[in-house]
């Protein structure tokens, strides 16, 4: 089972202790397009979540590019 969340302004909690095989990765939204294009981020459900955040909630995470 996979759960995906979009958080803006997130910061890493130094006290976070994973209970299972959980990996929390924080990255700048400007890096997301390049991560998708290079194949480093391949989660179809994650990419769908980013698209839904844009279309439904106007949270634009794939517009900025570091090029």
Image: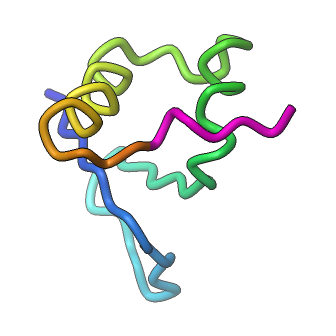
Stretch in magenta: 61-67
Any magenta on residue 64? yes
Q: Is residue 37 above or below residue 40?
A: above
| Display coloring | rainbow
Which residue of the protein is positioned furthest toward the bottom in this rendering? 15
Residue beneath the point at 71% across and 25% down: 34
Quarter of the figure with residue 50 = top left
Residue beneath the point at 35% across and 12% down: 44
Is residue 53 rendered to the left or right of residue 15?
Answer: left
Is residue 12 rendered to the left or right of residue 5?
Answer: right
Q: Is residue 5 above or below residue 51?
A: below
Q: Quadrant of the N terminus?
A: top left
Is residue 42 rendered to the left or right of residue 33?
Answer: left
Any magenta on residue 25? no
Residue beneath the point at 30% across and 25% down: 51
Q: Is residue 47 above or below residue 28?
A: above
Instruction: Looking at the picture, tell me which residue is in the foreground, 37 or 62.
Output: 62
Instruction: Looking at the picture, tell me which residue is in the foreground, 42 or 48.
Output: 48
């Amino acid at each position: 089972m996979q759960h995906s969340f979009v958080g803006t302004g997130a910061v890493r909690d130094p006290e976070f202790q994973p209970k299972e095989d959980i990996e929390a990765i924080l990255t700048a939204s400007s890096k997301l397009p390049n991560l998708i294009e290079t194949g480093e981020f391949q989660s179809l459900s994650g990419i769908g979540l980013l698209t839904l955040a844009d279309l439904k909630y106007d949270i634009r995470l794939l517009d900025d590019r570091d090029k």
